[in-house]
Image: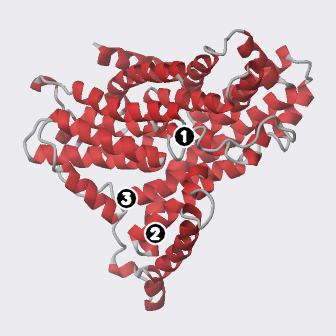
Amino acid sequence: MISRLGLLLSRAFRSVMPDPFVLAVLLTFVTIALALLLTPSSPTQVVDAWASEIGLWSLLRFAMQMSLILVTGYALATSPPVARLTRRLAQLPTTGANAAILVAVLATTTGVLNWGLGLIVGAVAAREVGAAMHRKGVPVHYPLLAASGYLGLMVWHGGFSGSAPLKVTSSGGITEIFGTAPPIGPLSLDLTLFSPMNLFVTGGLLVLLPIVMAALAPRNAATIRTADSFGITVDDGEANVPARPPESERKPLLPRLLEETPFVSYALVLLIAIWAWRYYWPAEGPSGIRALTPDTVNLTMLGLGLLLHRTPASYVRAVERAASGAAGIILQFPLYAGIMGIMTATGLTALFATSLAAISTSTTLPLTTFFSAAVINVFVPSGGGQWAIQGPIAMHSAITAGIEPAKMVMAVAYGDQLTNMLQPFWAIPLLAITRVQARDIVGYTTVAMLLGALWISLGLLLF
């Protein structure tokens, strides 16, 4: 029944929603219209704000950071040691429910570490577990496994690669929101990711989501669609790093020694390791784990990926496969930056913040922000892009209403991750690896979304 509802909602969204890039363009014109209607700005002032330094090109660095999070996460997930571990774990389940639990646990735990890593590990795990169960003759509903593999995107924003909590750890991130005289300083991860509220919310989701997936496992054999019906019949490793080029395409000796031996990679790994030791285990002061930024996350993922791939050639091949998945980030972030520029320069941000604070109490404002973020994410399926648009509104509202800014940061983060379960934008790499279609999984992810919304709402009310 609930699965049918999820499929119905998915079809409804697909029937009216165009490509995410087109949505970003439409949102740009909606923002322009709102600025002209609700503020005294002239058309030329709005256009100038859109194309100014605080507009279109203000998020180029952030876009590169988000692209690297995806690429480095993919490269690490498809490294030979991680791929082998995934295959061994795939042999463990004996029932469909156990299989769903395993895939969900792998996807969510790695998703907390890095959203790109969680997405790819979840996809590879779903594929490998589905193939392993088919070979053992155990009927397992493969779309449920694929849905379980997507759950990392429902916990990622409360984890170490979350755009919003990482963005506000720096003075630059705060200045982007409030200008040159911000009323607050940078927000450390102690106030966001390591807060009691986030430990409750994200920790609870790590337990709740695998249980939900297990409960959704079909018991009627007639309704089970196994991996072979999607063309997944053997553990052929197609989801992993591409094979080395044929001998006829191999390079001369010196380039091969540099590219296909670990010396160059390990030299760079050593350099990163020296930095990591001083950053994560400093002689004085707290560990850098409590002040992670997109840059430090990416550098850590780069070092781990190079270490596990061993050779530069292997790592480059993995990155080349991952790069196409970053196309949406590269293309859409300038448009989101332009929207942010319009909202900031015309005063729309302050207007929305005041209005939101006026209709909410200090108790309900985080919930209002959470649900509004969930709705916005359906149309702006990018955590970084959404934070660029909604972050200033949420933070100004927090200051106006006297609410902890860190709590509002997490309210936006939770809303953003919640409706990833309805929005298939980030599922594109998973769909390619598992060979399922969005309509095959969205019924199950919708159930996870609804129960997750209740849990997150409880966390926002309790803390």
In the picture, the quarter occupied by the C terminus is top right
Query: The residue tagged with tag 3: helix, strand or loop?
Result: loop
Dot 1: element: loop
Q: Give the residue at x 58% y 27%.
A: 411
In the rendered image, residue 79, in percent from the top left (x then y), is placed at 37, 63
Marks 1 and 3 close (CB-CB < 8 Å): no
Tell me: residue 142, above or below residue 360: below
Q: Distance between the residues labelled 1 and 3?
A: 27 Å
In which image quadrant can residue 371 be found? top right
Which label lies toward us, 1 or 2? Answer: 1
Q: Residue at x 52, y 47 (%)?
A: 160
> On residue 52, which mark appears?
none
Between marks 2 and 3 in the image, the one whose residue lies nearer the viewer? 2
Q: Which amino acid does label 1 sit on?
A: Leu
Mark 3 residue crowding within 10 angstroms, few (<14) / some (14–19) / many (20+): many
Quarter location, residue 27:
top right
Residues at circles 2 and 3 in contact by the CB criterion of under 8 Å: no
The mark that comes first in sequence, 1 or 3, is 3
Q: Nearer the viewer, mark 1 or mark 3?
A: 1
Instruction: State how far apart marks 2 and 3 are (Cα).
Output: 11 Å
In depth, the one of 177 and 337 nearer the eye is 177
Give the residue number, with chain letter if any, for mark 2: 306
Residue found at x 47% / y 19%: 458
Percent from the top left, x then y, of residue 115?
Answer: 47, 45
Task: Please name the residue that numbered disc 1 is placed on.
Answer: 193
Q: How far apart are marks 1 and 2 (CA)?
A: 27 Å
